[in-house]
Amino acid sequence: MQDDDAAGQGGGAAYSIRAVDRVCDLLDALQQQPETGMSLAALAEAASLPKSSTLRYLSALEARSYVERDLEDGGYRLGLAFRPQRFDYLAALRDAVLPPLVKLRDRFEETMNFAVLDGIEVVHVEVVESERRVRLAASRGERACLHSTATGKVMAGQIPEARLRAILEQTGMAVFTADTITSIDVFLNEVKLTAERGWGLDDCENQPDGRCVAVPVDGLAVPAALSLSAPASRFASEDAQRIAHLLKKQMTALADAARAVPR
């Protein structure tokens, strides 16, 4: 069977229309299975496409949150862009975690972040900034990469390795600082280490003068993590393990509040 992408080369307008038709075929098929989702093979059959072309279309749709892949069975379903109830869920999560997040900020005197995995990106659902004059903070709703963030490393451990490798090959590994990990194999080893010890570290990899330590928040409808971020000048890398263990001890109220949110 001829690859659908190759078949369209040489005819700009016709190819564009064909590409739109294929995307619509895939979304229509997923619309018929909103809860259970569909496998790559089933979607390829529904759209009359080779699996290779289907995967490329799905990867592009996933990057825009129109499609998401189940981390357990590898199936595909409609993403956040077509599921407003997920936005409601994230809004409810934000409201639930804010009070305990403020208490954690006051306890540690540094910026606290609650983030979730949205497709192939980290999304900061809520951020409570440190009240210190010099501080490190993302903005609520800000998106970040998996490979350069502590929360990303924690949540990457919940993605099958083959899928994670495909994501990194698709998105690339942008360089943010001299310490950003840019090798897929090195990052995969970092993810394994993160999973084994139960916490992740951004060691000046996303911002030149910033460190962040993250721990997983399990039991939610989406992969999630809690993190503390601070300027490197007062957060030494050798303190990461101690802070991570303290976060785990102090995060019970936040985790309970997040788990109580109806899915």
Image (cartoon, rainbow, N blue to C red):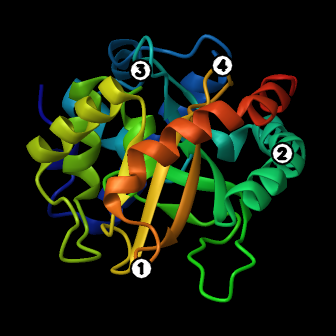
Residue 233 marker: 1
| Residue 262 seen in this snapshot | yes
Q: Earlier in the sequence, mark 4 or mark 2?
A: 2
Q: Nearer the viewer, residue 126 or 16?
A: 126
Check disc 1 and give the amino acid type.
Ser
Say above or below: 243 vs 237.
Answer: above
What SS does tag 3 mark?
A: helix
Please state which of the two labelled residues, at mark 3 or mark 1, is closer to the viewer.
1
Seen in the image, is 233 located left or right of residue 228? Answer: left
Residue 100 marker: 2
Crowd band around label 3 with a 10 angstrom C-alpha radius: few (<14), some (14–19), many (20+): many
Check disc 4 and give the amino acid type.
Gly
Q: Position of residue 262 (x, y in %)?
A: 87, 23
What is the spatial separation of the Cα atoms under label 3 and label 1, in whole angstroms? 51 Å
Seen in the image, is 173 located left or right of residue 28? Answer: left
Check disc 2 and give the amino acid type.
Pro
What SS does tag 1 mark?
A: loop
